[in-house]
């Protein structure tokens, strides 16, 4: 029995590991690498394992860095297994994978259009044997429709005729839709057979709705081997969902190998409950400046947590009368998934909301943007408001349009409420904004470049690190020490190398046996 680590090894994104036992190959997540396009393109396009060799997939949760390459796995029809996950994860993937496909298609369309424009600009200046300047001008005039939508067919014909590079999406909406037929939702603590002699059981991980720890067990000749896959470990005492479980049955307490995330293995978060007051303070200060709060947020988990806290503040009459907008079609759909799974809510949510007949995700100040036109109008609205929009790392989506209109105004606040990966625009905003704030906002503001233009970062940048959905070192140690688990060896994954190394060093000092696998490394169990 062995495990090979194909992603999220000494890095945060692209979670993908393969457990092999005899003829069984069980894939633990199949996530997308996220970050700069040039650095992630080839990692994402080529699956490290032949899909026809995979017996089944065990999916820890729906976030794209854990689920995003599943459509590649199922696209050719050579994968004949199932994708096992919890019911909320299956429901969320219906929206997340289709949204991911639309992003891939949109990116490809934009890049192909840009390549076509560059080619036609060269022809316009000097012409070619195959294409006159007049013909180039005629083609250029029809690259977009009257409503400014790119005509992909015209663009592709031009690129192919001129033997120019054509960018293909990682996968299409049709591919994503096809993958959904492979999903099987299995409740927590209900054993399932995922291989010829391998059984898997989900336990609440407390990261997002439906996220799961998985214990995979093989019993052969009376000998049991247990592998514990953490996925992403959540925080204790967060609102809405239950804590990471610390209660495991006796047969799942002796762990031969634990595959453990380390996103914040060397950091400590502020207490979760302090976040509501800090959120109120940021909103109040921005209101007093006459500005708006722009919050880049992940559509699944972070957006709903923000809605929850803002709703509590409204019930306490502690929030200024600012309209709150959720400008993300995906977040709107995912919020419905939350509404469909109250069985996963914690006791506090039942006490504050459900037992009083109140929907945590509906209140008078909250509005969901319904159309592109409404989003554009909100961009130009100079009245104080709060807008929550994707993408969470500012790598695309509607949040960039809000930043484009608001980032240059010192009345406004960009509120960071989650992890910003290395190389993302969100990390750049965070670092430049924090440095400017630390310097007392003296001198010329830093500049940031997006949409092919430089913008002065005059808006305030605030960072509420306690909103993270990932457990810090204390949370990770609580899982290890308060659960009664007896762990022989820990493979540390899903962390930037600095975090993983520091966490491993600490665990070793606490008596644990650790290894930090590299991508492609295989560990025998």
Image (cartoon, grey):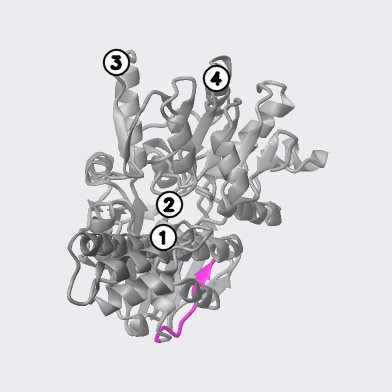
Of badges 2 and 4, nearer the viewer stands 4
Q: Is residue 201 left or right of residue 117?
A: right
How many numbered marks appear? 4
Q: Secondary structure at mark 1?
A: helix
Query: Main structural element of the magenta stretch: helix, strand or loop?
Result: loop
Of badges 2 and 1, nearer the viewer stands: 1
Quadrant of the drawing holding the C terminus: bottom left
Going from the N terminus, do you reach mark 1 or mark 4 first?
A: 1
As displayed, is residue 315 above or below residue 118? above
Q: Which mark is residue 232?
A: 2
Is 143 on the left-hand or right-hand side of 432? right
**Is residue 353 positioned above or below 432 on the image?**
below
Answer whether residue 81 is magenta in the image.
yes
2 or 1: tag closer to the N-terminus: 1
Q: Which residue is mark 1?
A: 66
- Measure the C-alpha gap from mark 2 to mark 1: 9 Å
Circle 3 residues within 10 Å: few <14, some 14–19, many ≥20:
few
Cβ atoms under marks 3 and 2 closer than 8 Å: no
Residue that mark 3 sits on: 439
Disc ID at residue 281: 4
Tell me which residue sits at (26%, 46%) in the image: 496
* Span highlighted in magenta in the image: 78-85
């Amino acid at each position: 029995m062995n495990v090979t680590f194909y992603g999220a090894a000494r890095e945060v994104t692209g979670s993908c590991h393969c457990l092999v036992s005899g003829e069984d190959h069980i894939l633990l997540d199949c996530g997308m690498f996220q970050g700069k396009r040039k650095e992630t393109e080839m990692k994402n396009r080529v699956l490290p394992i032949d899909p026809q060799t995979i017996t089944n997939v065990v999916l820890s949760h729906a976030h794209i860095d854990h689920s995003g390459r599943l459509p590649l796995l199922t696209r050719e029809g050579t994968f004949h297994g199932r994708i096992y996950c919890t019911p909320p994860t299956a429901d969320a993937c219906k929206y997340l994978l289709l949204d991911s496909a639309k992003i891939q298609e949109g990116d490809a369309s934009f890049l192909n259009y840009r390549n076509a424009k560059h080619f036609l600009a060269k022809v316009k200046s000097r012409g070619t044997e195959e294409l006159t300047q007049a013909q180039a001008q005629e083609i250029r005039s029809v690259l977009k429709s009257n409503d400014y939508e790119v005509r992909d067919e015209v663009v592709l014909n031009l690129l192919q005729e001129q033997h120019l590079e054509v960018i293909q999406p990682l996968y299409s909406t049709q591919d994503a839709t096809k993958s959904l037929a492979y999903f099987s939702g299995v409740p927590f603590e209900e054993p399932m057979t995922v291989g010829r002699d391998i059984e898997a059981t989900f336990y609440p991980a407390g990261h997002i709705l439906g996220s799961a720890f998985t214990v995979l067990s093989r019993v052969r000749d009376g000998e049991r081997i247990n592998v514990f896959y953490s996925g992403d470990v959540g925080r204790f005492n967060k609102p809405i969902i239950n804590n990471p479980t610390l209660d495991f049955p006796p047969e799942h307490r002796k762990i031969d190998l634990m595959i453990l995330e380390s996103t914040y293995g060397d950091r400590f978060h502020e207490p979760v409950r302090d976040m509501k007051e800090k959120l109120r303070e940021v909103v109040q200060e921005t209101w007093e400046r006459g500005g708006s709060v722009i919050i880049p947020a992940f559509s699944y988990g972070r957006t709903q947590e923000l809605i929850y806290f803002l709703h509590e503040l409204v019930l306490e009459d502690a929030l200024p009368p600012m309209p709150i907008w959720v400008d993300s079609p995906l977040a709107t759909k995912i919020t419905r998934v939350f509404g469909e799974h109250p069985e996963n809510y914690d006791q506090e949510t039942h006490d504050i909301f459900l037992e009083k007949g109140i929907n945590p995700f509906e209140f008078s100040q909250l509005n969901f943007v319904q159309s592109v036109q409404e989003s554009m109008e909100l961009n130009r609205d100079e009245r104080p408001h709060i807008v929550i929009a994707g993408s969470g790392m500012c790598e695309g989506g509607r949040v960039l349009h809000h930043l484009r209109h608001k980032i240059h105004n010192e009345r406004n606040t960009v509120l960071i409420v989650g992890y910003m990966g290395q190389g993302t625009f969100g990390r750049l905003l965070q670092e430049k904004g924090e440095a400017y704030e630390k310097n007392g906002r003296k001198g010329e503001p830093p500049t940031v470049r997006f949409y092919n233009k430089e913008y002065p970062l005059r808006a305030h940048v605030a960072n509420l690190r306690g909103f993270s959905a990932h457990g810090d070192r204390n949370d990770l140690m609580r899982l290890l020490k308060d659960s009664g688990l007896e762990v022989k060896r820990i493979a540390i994954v899903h962390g930037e190398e600095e975090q993983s190394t520091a966490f491993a060093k600490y665990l070793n000092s606490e008596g644990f046996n650790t290894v930090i696998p590299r991508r492609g490394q295989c560990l025998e169990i």
